[in-house]
Amino acid sequence: MNNLRISDSDRSQLLVAARQAVRQAYAPYSQFRVGAAVLTQRGNVFAGCNVENASYGLTICAERVAICSAVAAEGEGMEIRAIAVVNQREVPCSPCGACRQFIWEFGAEATVIFQGREGVKEMPAAALLPEGFRLG
């Protein structure tokens, strides 16, 4: 199980940062704006938003934008302690499969906070993606 529980203060900070990031989203095609915020093991918070593209396969999710920002700032040793994902419609929105793998790569036991069917849910990344992929 997740031994990296986060405090109410950290949870609140992540949700605020993710909600602010929603406003920056570039979603002219789907109109579905998503924001994410990552808390690293070093205690830093990095936000990201979804960025769509006319060539839809090039679209990048908010979770991966936030994680890439964290890696760019902290380097290859960056580890995720927690990540929050929100959307402007406040409808259920767990990370997609690609983002689950991306989160797992940097923190299999990281707490993932997202809008579920019955409110905000929280679970370890490994519960969202059991047996995540690793080379070697």
Image (cartoon, rainbow, N blue to C red):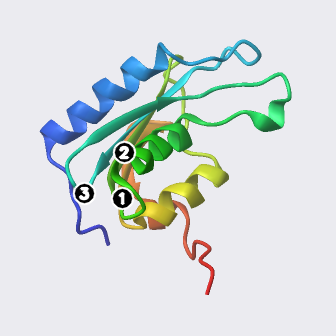
Q: In which quadrant will I find the N terminus?
A: bottom left
Using residue 46 as the reference point, say whether residue 86 is left or right of it. right
* Residue 126 numbered tag: none
Q: For mark 1, what is the residue?
A: 78
Label 3 crowding class (10 Å Cα cut-off): few <14, some 14-19, many 20+? some
State how far apart marks 1 and 3 are (Cα): 7 Å
Q: Residue at label 2? A: 73
Q: Nearer the viewer, residue 12 or 25?
A: 25
Give percent across and percent down for residue 131.
Answer: 57, 76
The amino acid pointed to by label 2 is Ala
The nearer-to-camera label among 2 and 1 is 2
Q: Is residue 92 above or below residue 72?
A: above
The residues bearing labels 2 and 1 have C-alpha atoms spaced at a distance of 9 Å
Look at the numbered disc 2 and give the secondary structure of its residue: helix
> Residue flagged by tag 1: what amino acid is it?
Met
Q: Rate crowding at label 1 as few (under 14), some (14 to 19) or many (20 or more) other CA atoms within 10 Å.
A: some
Q: Specify the amino acid type for callout 3.
A: Gln
Farthest residue, direction right: 55
The residue closer to the viewer here, 115 or 29, is 29
Residue visible at 47% across and 31% down in the picture? 48
Which residue is identified by label 3?
A: 41
Cβ atoms under marks 1 and 3 closer than 8 Å:
yes
Q: Is residue 41 above or below residue 66?
A: below
Q: Could one spot residue 94 in this view of the protein?
A: no
Q: Is residue 46 above or below residue 31?
A: below
- Position of 133 with respect to 111 (left or right) is right
Quadrant hosting residue 33: top right
Q: Are marks 2 and 1 in contact (CB under 8 Å)?
A: yes
In space, the residues marked 2 and 3 are separated at their CA atoms by 13 Å
Give the crowd class for mark 2: few <14, some 14-19, many >=20 residues within 10 Å: few
